Amino acid sequence: MENVVELKNVTKHFKDFSVKNIDLQVKQGFITGFIGANGAGKSTTIKMMMNLLKPDAGEINIFGLDYKNHEKAIKERIGFVYDGNVFFEGLNLRDIKRIVAPAYKHWDDELFDQYIETFGLPLNKAIKTFSKGMQMKASLAIALSHRAELIIMDEPTAGLDPIFRRELLNILQELMIDGSRTIFFSTHIITDLDRIADYITFMQGGELVFNQSIHDIAENYALVKGGLDLLDRDTEKDFVHIHRAPTGFQALTANVNAVKRTFGNTVVIERASLEDIMYSFKGGVHHV
Ligand SMILES: Nc1ncnc2c1ncn2[C@@H]1O[C@H](COP(=O)(O)OP(=O)(O)OP(=O)(O)O)[C@@H](O)[C@H]1O
């Protein structure tokens, strides 16, 4: 199976905000980074993927199964890691293991002990005494100990120091070696993505802007700089966003080949970073 997660036309309305018509496929065996500004709808989308929130419309399939008929089977195969204390605060990891293990068919006690040791976590200390990084590691250890095929994480690196963060990213990368696992995680830390992501899902204002491989993004997106006299109604069609200044324009294109055809060597073309792309879309999705 190529797509582990499939969202078709998924919509969720809140009073002042909607996630609209999301079509998203998450590919098996890859790490997908989920980006978007504050309030773009990332957590809402992740909650729908986890069936913690029901969509108002659309379809969600995980491992080709729907939640209506296969919730238990799906959840067995997902590890959910998110920013916040998932556990009862007074408990320690030994208690948690006792409570959580029977819930999973593929729970592996030895693997759990191994991760606890690798992550340097104490078994007997109450979770409430754990730092944010330790809590994240505990949550990940549990996800991994039931041999989750799909790991979904909502901002797992938020609030972690750079050393912990890099350690976590290395662990995630090691998990991918056998090729069968899939990781989908949201983050605001773009350098995390440069380090480990294969695909980027970008959401803005409740809409999906794109879901593309890092390679395709680098091939297609670019920053273009040139004189204002080059812009007119036709040439502007090559851009998703244009910033005009008295000295010239800077624009983002999603089709660098079209720009080359239109402008030849009258413009300067530079690589667009993910940050450049996010910034250009900040006013909302421009349908081009
Ligand atoms: N249960 C809810 N009821 C009403 N509005 C909600 C609810 N949950 C989320 N929202 C609104 O939906 C919007 C998107 O929120 P969401 O948490 O999905 O964004 P996000 O992309 O994860 O943001 P951040 O990066 O800041 O965590 C916000 O405006 C939020 O206020």
Image: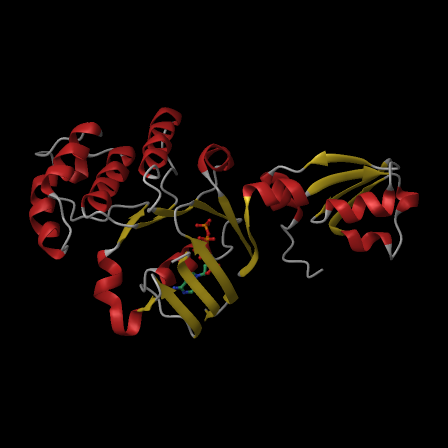
Residue at far top of view: 163
Question: Quarter-wise, where is residue 207 in the image?
Answer: bottom right
Colour setting: secondary structure
Q: Quadrant of the C terminus?
A: bottom right
Q: What percent of the width, then of the height, locates residue 21?
A: 52, 68
Q: Quadrant of the N terminus?
A: bottom left
Residue at far right of view: 229
Left or right, 110 with reference to 159: left
Q: What percent of the width, then of the height, locates residue 277?
A: 63, 44
On the question of residue 166 being in view, the answer is: yes
What residue is drawn where x is 43% and y is 74%?
56
Question: Quarter-wise, where is residue 223 in the image?
Answer: top right
Number of on-image labels:
0
Left or right, 41 with reference to 160: right
117 or 278, which lies in front? 117
What residue is drawn where x is 44% and y is 65%?
7
Left or right, 276 with reference to 260: left
Question: Quarter-wise, where is residue 43 in the image?
Answer: bottom left
Please say if 203 is above or below 96.
below
Q: What percent of the width, then of the height, locates residue 83?
A: 33, 45
Left or right, 228 with reference to 10: right
If the picture is divided into quarters, which one holds ligand 1? bottom left
Q: What percent of the width, then of the height, locates residue 40?
A: 51, 55
On the question of residue 205 being in view, the answer is: no
What residue is drawn where x is 39% and y is 51%?
28
